[in-house]
Amino acid sequence: MVTVSDRHRDRGQLLLVGAITLAFIILGAVVVYNGVLATETVSSGPTGQIGTEAKVMNAELENGLRGVAHRGNIRWSSDYDDTLENVITTEYADSYLNTTASSRPAATQIENVNIVMEARVATNNLTTKSINLTNTESANNTTRRVGHFALEFDPDDRNGDITVRSVNSSGNPTEVTIKDTGSSADPYEIRSCDIDQPVRIDFVRGTINGTERKCVPKLIDLNESYDKVELEGEPPEKDDAPGQYELVVKGYKDIDSIANVDSGAWEIEADVTYTSTEISYTRLQQVPIYTDH
């Protein structure tokens, strides 16, 4: 009979235990790896794609609401609140929802539109020399944020050069002169850039007739507050250039140096209902109208 010594028996048991332990370790590693692989597969599959689509759709929705509210600031002179609610919940909602009907998830309803922060809007003739933006009713005489500042004028009835200047809350001025070239083809120029007709310059976006141009300085920084903006003609007797300016400032206080000022919106909110194949929920969405983002 062959006998196994205790020493050899103990060694065999140790090897067996070690093999079993190693097997469990390998099995655990396989389970963890498969779990990670499954997670990556799911996140890169339809669910991840839906999340990306939702972010894109949300950005498009906010940009649309922002555009409607801004156009309303410039074009609607009265009943802004009611008009904003009506246009967004009917005209814009119908157009937007029809466009995104095949998206998943999709915004299926927009309602309860409210103004979170008011704005004051001035669209007047180019006759004001200096527009004081400080709130003189405040104990601190606070300055104001500017969301939109643009000039639009008739080059066929021009009256010489126009200097446009902004002065921020620190008292630092930034200015540019729009020069009268005397030419009918390119009636004005800014820093050697010719301006075609019609002449419309946005000093927040740095655009001429809707196109961004490096020669147009951004006189207004959306993140700063301002004491005033100024319009000056040269020579002095011709400082009432024909045309209009558009100005939107933050807050509900009127602009002291301007008689004709309308109410508008700086920030709005709305209840937006989102629907996918699995869930439907309503979210209160706040949309700042004037932002760099």
Image: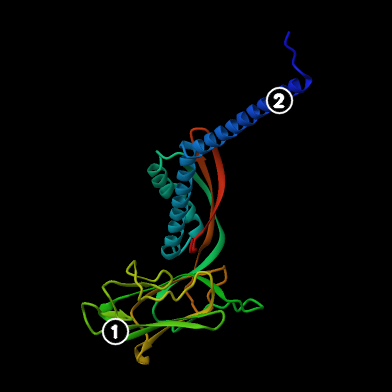
Quarter of the picture containing the N terminus is: top right
Q: Is residue 106 visible?
A: no
Q: Is residue 198 left or right of residue 126?
A: left
Q: Looking at the rendered structure, which numbered label has been put on residue 163?
A: none
Q: Is residue 253 above or below residue 1?
A: below
Q: Nearer the viewer, residue 2 or 34?
A: 2
Q: Nearer the viewer, residue 57 or 236?
A: 57
Q: Is residue 133 visible?
A: yes
What residue is pinned by disc 1? 180
Q: Residue 52: percent from the left, percent from the top?
A: 47, 45
Quadrant in the rendering for residue 114: bottom right
Q: Looking at the rendered structure, which numbered label has been put on residue 17?
A: 2
Q: Is residue 125 above or below residue 24?
A: below
Q: Secondary structure at mark 2?
A: helix
Q: Residue 2: percent from the left, percent from the top?
A: 72, 11
- Find the distance from the CA under tag 1 to the CA under tag 2: 94 Å
Do the residues under discs 1 and 2 have CB atoms within 8 angstroms? Answer: no
